[in-house]
Image (cartoon, rainbow, N blue to C red):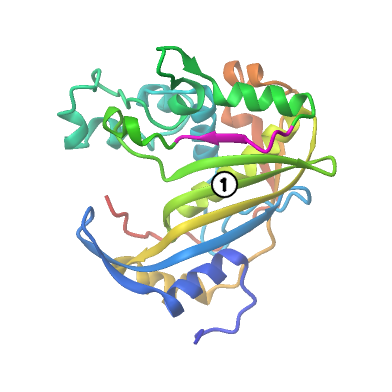
Amino acid sequence: MSVTTQNFSQYEDLCQRIIDEGEWVNNERTGKRCLTLINADLEYNVEANEFPLVTTRKSYFKAAIAELLGYLRGYDNAADFRAIGCNTWNANANENNAWLNNPHRKGEDDMGRVYGVQGRRWQKPDGSTLDQLRKIVDDLSNGVDDRGEILTFYNPGEFDMGCLRPCMHTHHFSLLGGKLYLNSIQRSADIPLGINFNQVQVFTLLALMAQITGHKPGKAYHKIVNAHIYEDQLDLMRDVQLKRTPFPAPKLHINPDIKSLEDVETWVTRDDFSIEGYECHPPIAYPFAV
């Protein structure tokens, strides 16, 4: 049973659920045990602008938005991500031994065919490429929803051509009642650390796509298949973070001059996104599993 009666937000509810219901799994990649739960669902009210930035510890959002911009632009190089304020790809591009020895690697900072490359330049059998995102933006801008407005980064046939297979792998957009909705699927998530990065990206992706296609945003639905807390994170989560009372959600502001995919591809920066009303508890130095 739950050890607390606090009125948690859905993020803290998920953390407590993992503690209450999770099972221990030995993770071969990290060499650590993790408390694991299969199937978790988060929901974000983008229409009401309830930005899901965690408040029970200090959290950061601009690097997450910068990474999202890099995905939408189809970046395949860690230097390009660094240039827009995101350092999350440095290690994967340059410190992953399997990738360093991969014949597909083109040199320093090369990431290969991961994430946004698949979203913007999916390789077709005839040698041409498919721009998934362009098709979705064009359809939505014309009020079209063919029930297949899907942006997927998951291409098993090219896993060996990139430094990392995607965690957040699929985004499915839907029009209903004059509003734009989003269903996003994530295969695996480090809940104390990584998940808030992904929460920010799901919310922002719907808000941004609604703005550039001329629709009101509805809700974003975020499914996490494997949600886990590493053993060396558990005490801090249970005895520190879950003892704190969440603050109200802040609001996200996006520069209204962003009106097209071309804007996103060319001049938009992470500074075109800001938040209002963010109140939080002090940071928590969670161990990171590499």
Q: Which residue lies at the image location 68% right of the left edge and 33% below the top edge? A: 209
The amino acid type of the residue labelled 1 equals Ser
Farthest residue to the right: give it: 177
Q: Position of residue 56 (x, y in %)?
A: 55, 65
Q: Is residue 72 visible?
A: yes
Q: Position of residue 224 (x, y in %)?
A: 49, 56
- Magenta-highlighted residues: 145-153
Q: Position of residue 216 (x, y in %)?
A: 80, 39
Taking 43 as reference, is 217 above or below it?
above
Q: Which residue lies at the image location 28% right of the left edge and 30% below the top edge? A: 93
Taking 92 as reference, is 37 above or below it?
below
Judged left or right of residue 70, residue 252 is right
Taking 290 as reference, is 212 above or below it?
above
Q: Nearer the viewer, residue 67 or 214?
A: 214
* Residue 54, quarter of the rendered image: bottom right
Q: Nearer the viewer, residue 99 or 246?
A: 99
